[in-house]
Image (spheres, rainbow, N blue to C red):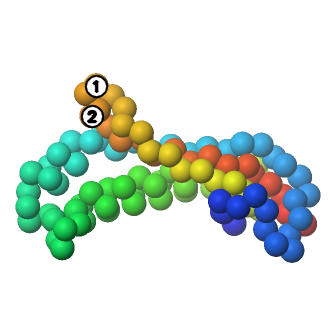
Amino acid sequence: MIITTTPSIDGRPVQEYLGIVMGESIVGAHIFRDIFAGVRDILGGRAKGYEDALRGARQEALHEMAVHSQNLGADAVLGVDIDYEVVGRRGSMLMVTSAGTAVKLG
């Protein structure tokens, strides 16, 4: 499965557009408060725990999108966009969404 932010793939024309596919992941934002509360999690000015939580949520959203596109019979997802949003009561959760166009390639 090719997943790309570009609108096309060189040398691989789109044979069929299968529709928009999405993936979502929501993680509890209390993780982030805990990270900043403990100086031991901050290494070299970077919050590794925070980065790991974001990376995991992003990977989950992309994986969910890929599974959806595979179920449609797609070879690739083009024009992928990833968004981050704080949701829930008092910003208690972080939502990561990915969206793109599932296609069959030539």
In this rendering, would 87 be left or right of 1?
left
Task: Determine the residue located farthest toward the front in the rendered image.
Answer: 45
What's the residue at 41%, 52% (across, down)? 57
- Residue 13 percent coordinates (x, y): 89, 65
Task: Tell me the quarter of the image containing the C terminus.
Answer: bottom right
Identify residue type, mark 2.
Ser
> Between marks 1 and 2, how big is the CA–CA gap?
6 Å
In this rendering, would 81 be left or right of 76?
left
Residue 69 appearing in the image: no
Question: Relative to residue 86, is residue 58 depicted above or below?
Answer: below
User: Which element carries disc 2, helix, strand or loop?
Assistant: loop
Residue 49 appearing in the image: yes
Q: Which mark is residue 92?
A: 2
Question: Relative to residue 77, is residue 23 depicted above or below?
Answer: above
Tell me if label 1 and label 2 are in contact, CB under 8 Å.
Answer: yes
In this rendering, would 25 be left or right of 64?
left
- Residue 87 percent coordinates (x, y): 37, 32
In this rendering, would 90 be left or right of 82?
left
Which residue carries the number 1 mark? Answer: 89
Looking at the image, which is closer to me, 76 or 38? 38
Task: Determine the residue located farthest toward the top in the rendered image.
Answer: 89
What's the residue at 8%, 65% (across, down)? 40
What's the residue at 69%, 54% (across, down)? 79
Badge 2 local density, few (<14 within 10 Å), some, or many (20+)? Answer: some
Question: Relative to residue 24, is residue 66 depicted above or below?
Answer: below
Looking at the image, which is closer to me, 1 or 81? 81
Snapshot quadrant of residue 54: bottom left
